[in-house]
Image (cartoon, helix red, strand yellow):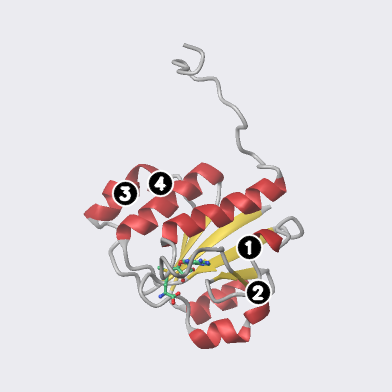
């Protein structure tokens, strides 16, 4: 089973860097739908995620249409605050490969695309009186960890023996 995070036209390198780190930690494949708001050589991206960049399986797609062609019939969840269904109600254990697509920082996902796939949209609950939205990299982390929790954290270390274990002293 592979979890896949898909970023639609990401603009802020630090967000993509953080998400790359989450992907490296969780064996998640990262898909970037162009155009990107930065170069993957960008020094900010390097600062945020270079240590992890080479440990992540990254797939670039020229545009949304090219990504959808690549996706075929595999399951795709659209992560958006506009959804009526909350993310923890979805069952992420059924399929071999699951894709989660997140919108760009300024404008989110294209409206027509969301309307066509309204039944696959998922919301992360929040207080809309206080914020317009959650941070993109936080939402990606929450979604992938909910999927992993449901899947039983496959291929992840549930504990690790550290040389200098600060808990054991
Ligand atoms: C900064 S938000 C974009 C806000 C944008 N103004 C909009 O209309 O969606 C970037 C992305 O984070 C995700 N996101 C942020 N808050 C969310 C929430 N409460 N539920 C689900 N996804 C959220 C979505 O994928 C969104 O497209």
Q: Position of residue 35 (x, y in %)?
A: 36, 74
Which residue is denoted by mark 2 in the rendering? 120
Q: Secondary structure at mark 2?
A: helix
Q: Are marks 2 and 3 in contact (CB under 8 Å)?
A: no
Please state if 97 lies on the left or on the right of 124 as rendered. Answer: right
Q: Earlier in the sequence, mark 3 or mark 1?
A: 3
Q: Which residue is outermost to the left?
A: 43
Q: Secondary structure at mark 3?
A: helix
Which residue is denoted by mark 1 in the rendering? 87
The image quadrant that residue 161 belongs to is top right
Q: Position of residue 127 (x, y in %)?
A: 49, 65
Is residue 102 or residue 36 the one in the foreground? 102
The image quadrant that residue 68 belongs to is bottom right
Q: Earlier in the sequence, mark 1 or mark 4?
A: 4
Q: Earlier in the sequence, mark 2 or mark 1?
A: 1
Which residue is denoted by mark 3 in the rendering? 48
Measured in 3D between alpha carbons, the distance from the residue under mark 3 to the one under mark 1, in whole angstroms, is 27 Å
Q: Which residue is outermost to the right?
A: 94
Measured in 3D between alpha carbons, the distance from the residue under mark 1 to the one under mark 4, in whole angstroms, is 29 Å
Task: Characterize the local packing of mark 1: few (<14), some (14-19) or many (20 or more) Cα atoms within 10 angstroms.
Answer: many
């Amino acid at each position: 089973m592979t979890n896949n995070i898909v970023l639609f036209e990401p603009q802020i390198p630090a967000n993509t860097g953080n998400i790359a780190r989450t992907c490296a930690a969780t064996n998640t494949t990262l898909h970037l739908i162009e155009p990107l708001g930065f170069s993957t050589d960008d020094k900010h991206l390097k600062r945020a995620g270079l240590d992890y960049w080479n440990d992540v399986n990254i797939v670039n797609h020229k545009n949304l249409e090219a990504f959808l062609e690549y996706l075929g019939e595999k399951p795709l969840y659209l992560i958006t605050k506009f959804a009526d269904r909350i993310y923890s109600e979805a069952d992420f254990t059924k399929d071999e490969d699951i894709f989660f697509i997140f919108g760009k920082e300024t404008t989110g996902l294209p409206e027509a695309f969301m309307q066509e796939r309204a039944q696959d949209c998922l919301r992360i609950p929040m207080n809309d009186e206080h914020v317009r939205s959650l941070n993109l990299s936080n939402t990606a982390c929450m979604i992938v960890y909910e999927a992993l929790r449901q899947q039983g954290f496959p291929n992840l270390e549930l504990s690790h023996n550290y040389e200098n274990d600060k808990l054991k002293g």
